[in-house]
Image (tube, grey):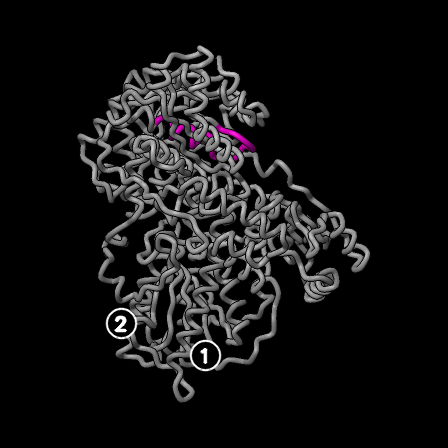
Amino acid sequence: MAGAGMAIAVLTSGGDAQGMNAAVRAVTRMAIYVGAKVFLIYEGYEGLVEGGDNIKQANWLSVSNIIQLGGTVIGSARCKAFTTRAGRLRAARNLVEHGITNLCVIGGDGSLTGADIFRSEWGGLLEELVRDGQISEEVARENCHLNIVGLVGSIDNDFCGTDMTIGTDSALHRIMEVIDAITTTAQSHQRTFVLEVMGRHCGYLALVSGLASGADWLFIPESPPEDGWEDLMCERLGETRSRGSRLNIIIIAEGAIDRSGKPISSNYVKDLVVQRLGFDTRVTVLGHVQRGGTPSAFDRVLSSKMGMEAVMALLEATPDTPACVVSLSGNQSVRLPLMECVQVTKDVQKAMDEKRFEEAIQLRGRSFENNWNIYKLLAHQKPAQEKSPFSMAILNVGAPAAGMNAAVRSAVRIGICKGHTVYVVSDGFEGLSKGQIREVGWHDVAGWLGRGGSMLGTKRTLPKTCMEKIVENVRKFNIQGLLVIGGFEAYEGVLQLVEARGQYEELCIIMCVIPATISNNVPGTDFSLGSDTAVNAAMESCDRIKQSASGTKRRVFIVETMGGYCGYLSTVTGIAVGADAAYVYEDPFTIHDLKANVEHLTDKMKTDIQRGLVLRNEKCHEHYTTEFLYNLYSSEGKGIFDCRINVLGHLQQGGAPTPFDRNYGTKLGVKAVLWMSEKLQEVYRKGRVFANSADSACVIGLRKKVVAFSPVTELKKVTDFEHRLPQEQWWLNLRLMLKMLANYQISLTEYISGKMEHVTRRTLSIEKGF
């Protein structure tokens, strides 16, 4: 065992954040997995200083059934004592007593900076303990070096260098739930709402929720409004009302300031609207609601991934490696030097204090800047510079997926900004063949952001069944750009159109596919629009199923998820709910594996945790159906546990889109239309568009961290059409984590450790996608 003889302690400190428990669980289990001893430190640094019962050894079951809980089960406290050397001396003594020389701290930048100071003083603290006769020289020698690894838990996402901090996504979920609820009452009464969200020094939550709700006005500390903003804001609010809107939403970060650094309060904004416009206006301060509630799927998976990586970082640490934070970059784990991140985080604050606001936004990272620019682009209609000669049509194809409407909305609006004629098509390719095509304006898509499903209507029909009629309508409406938002059929459909270019010159136009499907099975992208919402829906159902099983005792649930042949949905949901197994088509399994799983559950029933949850992707095996698994588990577990089946079905397609899908849809819509506009310019000759090169028909997608355009003809080579899957899928490496955290003994050799990367102004300027 790689970690034999090691002792690792984990603590949570600072403000709580949803997902901290998932991180504690992952650190604990991964450490036990590698053979180390694990201690949980209760009440943060206070427990570290006080010692005694606050430091307890943990076992595998200590962290069972906590992944779905918000907050932190080991407690967190603000601690004055640890900021003094005397306090840190007591803390060092408590760690040495248990032989702990590895510390994993989950908290914000203050907590992590404290840990780094503790580490740098460690040698001196031990010398002092030896001098005072509290420990022997031999003990000091054995514990001569303290390793520190940090996980950033902060709902503000205010830590530079990390894409997302633990809790940010969940906080956005809480904010969007409130905005959706407030929107309905505001519409009934034609009200204006001023919503104050958390973020004393960082406007991330305000910015992303403003982008995801299509707010009318937004205040963030990094970019104070120009002087005279009061007039402009009131003018704009009045304008939206006169165009028929029944409500206004204004979002303000608690740390909002004006150009001179004076705070802007939500009440000041409210009074302004009432006095100048006479609108019925209300203030809602979200406060600590944002820290509460169950963690989102993203936060559970992020924390589990980071927790495992933290243990690996401690295993591999030497006295010369700097203290690091574990983070996610794209969808890979990385390690970043703690103090480099802290330094850049301080630089942002300094830039804001010195009123260098442009620079503050750049230091927040490219994604933040990108969000801000897209918000400004979409919030308010600016007349196009000139009418363009181009027409484009937008349609939805395949099954409905959350986020489709957000993509249509932003695509329509950017198209109008560019001066194009924008058409929308009802009912997919079938509607295109029947001429269900209409021109749309800026306000026709207002309020679409938070709507689930597909407002345009969507069908699975492929073009080859009605090619002649499609071509006829492309000619009739003079369509030169086609934006297809949908799943595998959207990709396959565009491929058919491209392959028919030889026969029909009308199809020599620019085409783009935005992948939108809950199955996440479109080649050319790591994430499809709608899969985040589907994973969250499946996860919420499984949380309830687990609760029911906990009450009944000795019960195993077999849950069937959707996804066609693609096992993404069941794998990620499995990690998020701590499932015992997830059967998928891509990871072939035999009767021996099934037998091992049954034995595993039989052993589990002998412990205090008498429940099991097994996920099965709908098409994972031709013969081992859900019914078959139920029969097998029932007869093998006779007298030890009983079984129940749950088929989740279409609830995975429904519901309001998650904040991620609203934003992802918005951004893909913007980037797709900007790309199409550029391509249209390139192939425009003598008053007409003629495009037949491979790169004139692409799938837009997020790969690692980059938004990429891949020609459909290229992707055809890496697609398994029989099973409707890309031949290679990045998420298969998550299956290792699923199995490890469910206590299956597998070898560590397959685990890919994160690399150490540096955080500088240059690395921050790289586009992270989100």
* Residue at image coords 55%, 51%: 208
- Provide residue 507's location: percent of width, then percent of height: 34, 76
Location of mark 2 (residue): 499
Instruction: Give the crowd class for mark 2: few <14, some 14-19, many >=20 residues within 10 Å.
Output: few
Judge from the rendering whether residue 619 lies leftward or rightward of residue 101; answer left or right: left
- Please name the amino acid that badge 2 sits on: Glu
- Please name the amino acid that badge 1 sits on: Phe
Give the alpha-carbon distance from disc 2 to disc 1, as whole Å. 21 Å
Instruction: Give the crowd class for mark 1: few <14, some 14-19, many >=20 residues within 10 Å.
Output: some
Name the quadrant of the N terminus: top left
**Which residue range is magenta in the image?**
12-29
Mark with earlier residue (2, 1): 1
Location of mark 1 (residue): 477
Q: Foreground residue, 351 or 420?
A: 351
Q: Foreground residue, 306 or 84?
A: 84
Q: Foreground residue, 656 or 729?
A: 729
Q: Is residue 561 above or below residue 550?
A: below
Q: Is residue 503 above or below residue 288?
A: below
| Residue 327 makes an appearance in the image | yes
Residue 626 image-quadrant placement = top left
| Residue 545 makes an appearance in the image | no
* Residue at image coords 69%, 58%: 246
**Any magenta on residue 716?**
no
